[in-house]
């Protein structure tokens, strides 16, 4: 079973229509749930989604931002039990792994686990990607699937209580550097 899990926080009045476009673009997908409400951190919201979806018996969780619109391919094309697979974003590959949207197989989740909740917003996805690569897990893009990501961090501009710098320093303390390339594993 594939479940699409979408953490959602209505930070402004336009956000609900953005979520509606996201859900409409997923037509034909049977299992979609939306975690509504502001959580203490974005990694916590992602983790709640993962726990609920895998707890419902999902084999794969497609974890998606609420401002993503599927525009080419189908989400099942992201499902490979031995890999973390993301689509292209806005018809391009600008980052091999980003938590905008990706497929997380239960088999890998049981090995790697959740997002590190010590991060508030930024760098949690990079931290997870580093853990994937360090464990020898294939992290890749399926270019046959594309999503539009038109809103560009709309929630983040309304979020107060963290800065990219503090999460970047948290990543540096944990890994000894402030960058990571999942393709090269460095």
Image: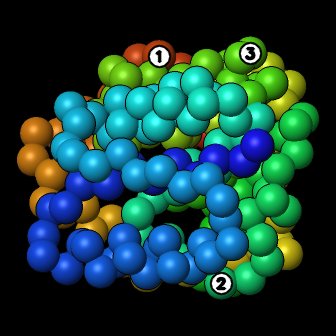
Q: Is residue 115 left or right of residue 74?
A: left
Q: Position of residue 184 (x, y in %)?
A: 80, 42
Q: Is residue 74 above or below residue 105?
A: below
State the CA–CA distance, disc 3 to disc 2.
Answer: 31 Å
CA neighbours of label 3 inside 10 A, class few (<14), some (14 to 19), many (20+): few
What sort of colour scheme is used for the picture? rainbow
Judging by the rendered image, the residue that carries numbered circle 2 is: 71
The residue sitting at 74% across, 82% down in the picture is 72
Dot 2: few (<14), some (14–19), or many (≥20) neighbours within 10 Å? some
Location of the N terminus (image quadrant): top right
Question: In this rendering, does residue 172 appear at all?
Answer: no
Element assignment for label 1: helix
Sequence-wise first label, 1 or 2? 2
Q: Which residue is mark 3?
A: 111
Q: Nearer the viewer, residue 100 or 50?
A: 50
Q: Earlier in the sequence, mark 1 or mark 3?
A: 3
> Could you tell me which residue is drawn at 41 percent across and 17 percent down?
173
Disc 1 designates what residue?
174
Neighbour class for label 1 at 10 Å: few (<14), some, many (≥20)?
A: few
CA–CA distance between discs 1 and 3? 20 Å
Residue name at image x 87 percent, y 37 percent: 81
Place of residue 37 in the rendered image (x, y in percent of width and height, measured from the top left): 21, 46
The residues tagged by marks 1 and 2 sit, at their Cα atoms, a distance apart of 37 Å
Quarter of the figure with the C terminus: top right
CB atoms of marks 1 and 2 within 8 Å: no
Q: Secondary structure at mark 3?
A: helix
């Amino acid at each position: 079973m594939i479940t699409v899990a979408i953490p959602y926080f209505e930070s402004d009045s336009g956000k609900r229509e953005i979520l509606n476009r996201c859900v409409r673009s997923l037509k034909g997908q049977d299992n979609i749930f939306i975690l509504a409400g502001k959580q203490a951190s974005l990694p916590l919201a992602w983790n709640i989604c993962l726990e609920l979806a895998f707890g419902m018996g999902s084999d794969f969780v497609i974890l998606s931002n609420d401002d993503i619109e599927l525009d080419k391919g189908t989400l099942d094309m992201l499902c490979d039990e031995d890999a973390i697979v993301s689509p292209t974003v806005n018809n391009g590959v600008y980052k091999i792994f980003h938590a905008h949207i990706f497929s997380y197989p239960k088999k890998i989740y049981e090995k790697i686990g959740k997002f590190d909740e010590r991060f508030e917003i930024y760098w949690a996805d990079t931290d997870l990607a580093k853990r994937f690569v360090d464990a020898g897990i294939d992290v890749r893009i399926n270019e046959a699937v594309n999503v539009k990501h038109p809103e560009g961090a709309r929630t983040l501009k309304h979020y107060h209580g963290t800065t990219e710098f503090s999460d970047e320093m948290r990543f540096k303390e944990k890994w000894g550097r402030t960058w990571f390339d999942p393709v090269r594993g460095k």
